[in-house]
């Protein structure tokens, strides 16, 4: 088969201009996916090298895009592709504009988007995420309760503070800061979520018609999970983009016999390690799926071997770079998660070695082993294997009926998590069982966002895809491997605090888009069973409309008899963490340029260090005048003291509040999508350390120029 990437059209357009326009429109989704993945990869590599600047990232992204441009060009497009692509891109642009206007202000470290957003803001003007302690290490020696870092999110390494986590997402959203300042950083993750929608569309049209492919893309766009995880800086939308793009390019690589496409796909799935330390869980599935596909596809054995070696090699290199990145720039974080991370890496490395050895044995007739299997078991056997996949997933769905999963109590982390879960249960009036993980309800979690009809269709679709794979439709192996491997892992053991929408993060990158795509495949396969053309067309229209309407039904909750019987999903209707930006702006304006002693509120440590660009010492106790005087001597200037407890420092006189602020975010719910808000109220007192160590209060409304 030819590997040419020339674009052709089924119906000859009337003019050369029409050809060019149709070609541009039809290929726009894939172009957007390629350019965004290239940008993210260039940003991730630059920050790994400690050289994250516009003049390294943007040219690097351009080089990567140009390198893969021809390989990733869609091969055969029709005029209907152009129309459908225009609809997909137009709808996605509207989605992006609306959600950018509703982007979160996640600038406090309540959960992961806090330190990820702040890391992105820091990278706008710096080459690495390492933040100089700037004298805070020496100043913290004044007291045993003073720290130059804060809990798990900000970790001291030498004389710098390292934000936890992998660095590709902060490096990518920092690009938004080069375009539109702080607002650009806050909105950038929405752009990544938008391109993820286009990736789902591009993958869907590998097995659906161009118009039909709009249904799964629209379904993802309308899920509360994709909206709610794209507005703050969660890592999952970028991971989704890499996973789905990796499936798309590997699928096409198998169909088109293109080694270059397979290489691009392997880099995309391997790059998940640059986004998350559990990235190998996605790479494992993709590698297994591609291996089965290449083993079974009817192609020259030399090409199959070289393609397999290329896929394994490039994916290994990318994962190694991701591991190196975390080891360099988030050292303590990697040490804390060493057991889990290394276990995944060992499994991945073992699979890569086995896959390489297996590929080396491909010297017989192409696709011989799967052909023999398919012939031996026949159509009924293929149906039985598909049924087995459906049965396994049905067992997962039934677990709430026959089991309850509990967490241990041996470690401090387990005890902490048990306490958090119990507090959620108490607030919602649920039975107090803090050790419950709710892992038996993982399929039910999917239904919160997709609804049960789509979940059931998704399960049937995965069974149908298995049948197609066994019946020698090799590309479905790529899809099944990349979707099922991480899905089964996290359906069994999500290992996450089980409140929503936090817990659905585990399923955003592969499971949710995978179930949606599988549901579309199942719906269209069922529609094909209708005997008449008119009936089939009507069934497909019903399926398409249903895929768009069903996620919309999760936006609202009806509770008759309540004071407010209709409630909306707050992750759709409100801006998360609104108020945080104004609060920090006010705090930074009190005494700009002074070092800060932060008393008792660790969530603001990184926020003040990044937003105020001043060294920060965290005081976990009540500082004495002598200790504060020593801090001032160490810094060489009088620091600003910030506290939310009016009696926690030695004031020279009774202080008055300088900042009163309210920050709003979604409530924590264990058995559904959040439909209510939580308000965090902050009252701040501020003062400047005097010569004897006492603290002179700053009057309300005070702001000063830098000392």
Image (tube, rainbow, N blue to C red):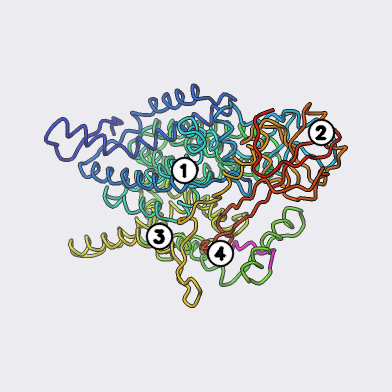
Q: Position of residue 295 (x, y in %)?
A: 43, 41
Q: Nearer the viewer, mark 3 or mark 4?
A: 3
Residue at mark 1? 243
Q: Nearer the viewer, mark 4 or mark 2?
A: 2
Residue 438 falls within the magenta-colored stretch: yes
Q: Residue at point 49% right, 32% down?
A: 175
Relative to 179, is 619 above or below?
Answer: below
Cα distance in 3D space between marks 1 and 4: 24 Å
Cα distance in 3D space between marks 2 and 3: 55 Å
Cα distance in 3D space between marks 4 and 2: 51 Å
Tell me if mark 2 has few (under 14), some (14-19) or many (20+) residues whose alpha carbon lies within 10 angstroms of its own: many
Looking at the picture, tell me which residue is in the foreground, 141 or 440: 141
SS type, badge 3: helix
Looking at the picture, tell me which residue is in the foreground, 666 or 319: 666
State the residue lying farthest toward the bottom.
561
Residue at mark 2? 631
């Amino acid at each position: 088969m030819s590997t040419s990437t020339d674009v052709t059209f089924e119906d000859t357009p009337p003019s050369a201009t029409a050809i060019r326009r149709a070609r541009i429109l039809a290929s726009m989704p894939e172009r957007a996916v390629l350019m965004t993945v290239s940008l993210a990869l260039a940003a991730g590599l630059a920050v790994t090298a400690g050289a994250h600047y516009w003049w390294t990232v943007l040219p690097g992204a351009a080089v990567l895009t140009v390198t893969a441009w021809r390989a990733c060009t869609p091969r055969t497009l029709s005029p209907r592709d152009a129309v459908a692509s225009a609809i997909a891109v137009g709808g996605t642009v509207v989605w992006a504009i609306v959600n950018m206007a509703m982007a979160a202000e996640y600038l406090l470290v309540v959960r992961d988007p806090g330190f990820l957003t702040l890391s992105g803001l820091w990278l706008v003007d710096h080459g690495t995420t390492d933040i100089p302690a700037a004298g805070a290490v020496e100043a913290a020696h004044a007291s045993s309760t003073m720290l130059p870092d804060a809990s798990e999110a900000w970790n001291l390494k030498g004389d710098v503070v390292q934000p936890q986590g992998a660095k590709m997402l902060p490096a990518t959203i920092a690009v938004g800061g080069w375009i539109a300042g702080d607002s650009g950083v806050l909105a950038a993750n929405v752009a990544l979520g938008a391109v993820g929608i286009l990736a789902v569309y591009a993958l869907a049209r590998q097995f659906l018609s161009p118009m039909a492919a709009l249904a799964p893309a629209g379904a993802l766009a309308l899920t509360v999970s994709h909206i709610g995880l794209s507005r703050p800086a969660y890592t999952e939308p970028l991971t989704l983009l890499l996973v789905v793009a990796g499936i798309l390019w590997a699928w096409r690589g198998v169909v088109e016999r293109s080694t270059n496409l397979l290489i691009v796909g392997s880099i995309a799935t391997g790059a998940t390690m640059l986004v998350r330390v559990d990235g190998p869980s996605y790479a494992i599935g993709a590698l297994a799926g591609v291996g089965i596909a290449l083993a079974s596809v009817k192609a020259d054995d030399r090409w199959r071997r070289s393609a397999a070696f290329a896929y394994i090699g490039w994916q290994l290199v990318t994962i190694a770079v991701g591991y190196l990145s975390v080891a360099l720039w988030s050292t303590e974080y990697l040490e804390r998660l060493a057991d889990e991370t290394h276990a995944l890496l060992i499994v991945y490395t073992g699979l890569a070695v086995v896959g390489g050895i297996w590929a080396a044995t491909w010297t017989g007739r192409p696709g011989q082993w799967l052909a023999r299997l398919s012939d031996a078991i026949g159509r009924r056997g293929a149906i039985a294997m598909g049924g087995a996949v459906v049965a396994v997933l049905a067992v997962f769905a039934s677990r709430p009926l026959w089991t309850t999963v509990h967490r241990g109590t041996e470690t401090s982390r387990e005890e902490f998590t048990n306490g958090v879960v119990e507090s959620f249960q108490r607030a919602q009036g649920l039975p107090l069982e803090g050790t419950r993980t709710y892992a038996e309800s993982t399929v039910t979690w999917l239904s919160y966002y997709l609804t049960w009809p789509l979940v059931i269709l998704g399960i049937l679709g995965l069974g149908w895809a298995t049948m197609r794979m066994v019946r020698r439709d090799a590309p479905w192996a790529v899809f099944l491997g990349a979707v099922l491997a991480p899905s089964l892992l996290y359906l069994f053991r999500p290992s996450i605090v089980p409140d929503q929408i936090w817990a659905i993060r585990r399923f955003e990158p592969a499971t949710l888009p995978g179930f949606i795509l599988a549901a579309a495949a199942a719906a269209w396969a069922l529609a094909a069973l209708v005997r008449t053309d008119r009936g089939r067309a009507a069934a497909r229209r019903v399926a398409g409309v249903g895929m768009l309407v069903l996620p919309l039904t999760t936006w609202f909750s009806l509770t008759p008899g309540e004071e407010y019987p209709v409630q909306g999903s707050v992750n759709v209707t409100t801006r998360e963490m609104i108020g945080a930006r104004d609060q920090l702006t006010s705090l930074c304006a009190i005494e700009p340029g002074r070092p800060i002693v932060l008393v008792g509120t660790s969530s603001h440590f990184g926020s003040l260090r990044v937003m105020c660009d001043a060294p920060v010492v965290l005081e976990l106790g009540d500082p004495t005048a002598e200790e504060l005087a020593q801090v001032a001597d160490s810094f060489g200037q009088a620091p600003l003291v910030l506290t939310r407890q009016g009696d926690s420092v030695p004031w020279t006189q009774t202080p008055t509040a300088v900042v009163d602020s309210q920050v709003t975010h979604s409530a924590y719910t264990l058995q559904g999508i959040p439909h209510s808000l939580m308000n965090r109220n902050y009252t701040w007192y501020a003062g400047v350390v005097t010569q004897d160590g006492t603290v002179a209060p700053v009057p309300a409304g005070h702001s000063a120029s830098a000392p």
